[in-house]
Image (cartoon, rainbow, N blue to C red):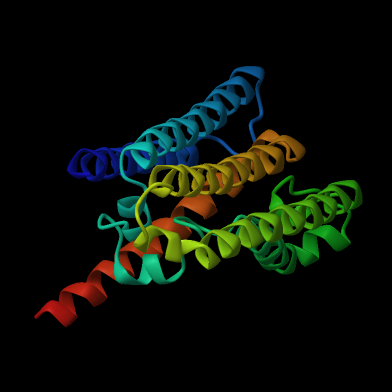
Amino acid sequence: MTSFSTFYNNWLDHLSQLVRQLATAPRPPTTIDQHRDLERLVAKTMNHYAEYYGAKAFAAERDVFNIFAAPWASSLERSLHWIAGWRPTTVFHLIYTESSILFESHIADILRGQRTGDLGDLSPSQFRRVSELQCETVKEENVITDELSEWQDGASELMGDGTNLDEKILQLVRIVQKADDLRLRTVRRVVELLTTQQAAEFLIVAAELQFGVRRWGLDQDRQRGN
């Protein structure tokens, strides 16, 4: 899985570049060209996430146990994993937290009737759709969690004569791919219900959280190693 580790590190570097472009783009966009440029960057970032999950699906088919082990991740990152990756409902906690922080920071402007257009300015309709999507995502998470539990209950078969080994491993690959599909689909659906400016801000905050957890985790691993 060295090749996937290399891919992952390169992928993170590219994500960092995309986030910098999103962060430096005019927000809110005030011209048609600025709006189109921001839309293009949001789409490019989403395609980058899709590329990651495509590569991960291929890697899981080659060695699903190493995908669970995730040697490219820090100990902290692995401790936060749900079925070899981040939990999809984390997206909603992130949106609610960022929206609350921005709302409070703009409260004076909002009371004067000024619209900020950022994540602190979500409409009632957007909040309703986010809440509905969260409920749907929780249900799907639970279904996949139950599938993994059933797989683990039958894991003793792996110690048997090996006749069902290939099928059991294939089942685990499918579970990981279902979890990854839910992760990517959740981000896509959230981005679709946000404005272009809000989507850009959401992608920036999500990536910054990912980078922050990774940096802290790697630092902790290095300290323990020393």
Is 147 left or right of 72, judged from the image as shown? right
Which image quarter is the N terminus in? Answer: top left
Q: Where is residue 33 shown, x and y percent of the image?
A: 60, 18
Image quadrant holding the C terminus, namely bottom left
Residue furthest left as drawn: 226
Rendered position, 195 above or below 162:
above
The percent position of residue 180, horizontal first and vertical second, equals 53, 45
Please tell me which residue lies in front, 148 or 3: 148
Q: Position of residue 149 (x, y in %)?
A: 58, 65
- Foreground: 7 or 220? 7
Which residue is located at x 32 percent, y 60 percent?
Answer: 69
Q: Residue at x 38, y 58 (%)?
A: 158
149 with respect to 215 (left or right) = right
Question: Percent from the top left, x then y, of residue 182?
Answer: 62, 45
Quick check: 221 left or right of 62?
A: left
Q: Identify the residue at horizontal 48%, vertical 49% (top origin).
A: 172
> In this view, which residue lies farthest toward the front?
161
Quadrant position of residue 219: bottom left
Q: Between residues 157 and 114, which one lies in front from this camera angle?
A: 157
Placement of 152 over or under 50, stated as above or below: below
Q: Give 214 or 145, whichever is nearer the viewer.
A: 145
Query: Number of labelled discs?
Result: 0
- Reply above or below: 205 against 7: below
| Residue in view at x 84 percent, y 54 percent | 127
Based on the displayed image, in which of its 4 quarters is residue 35 positioned? Answer: top right
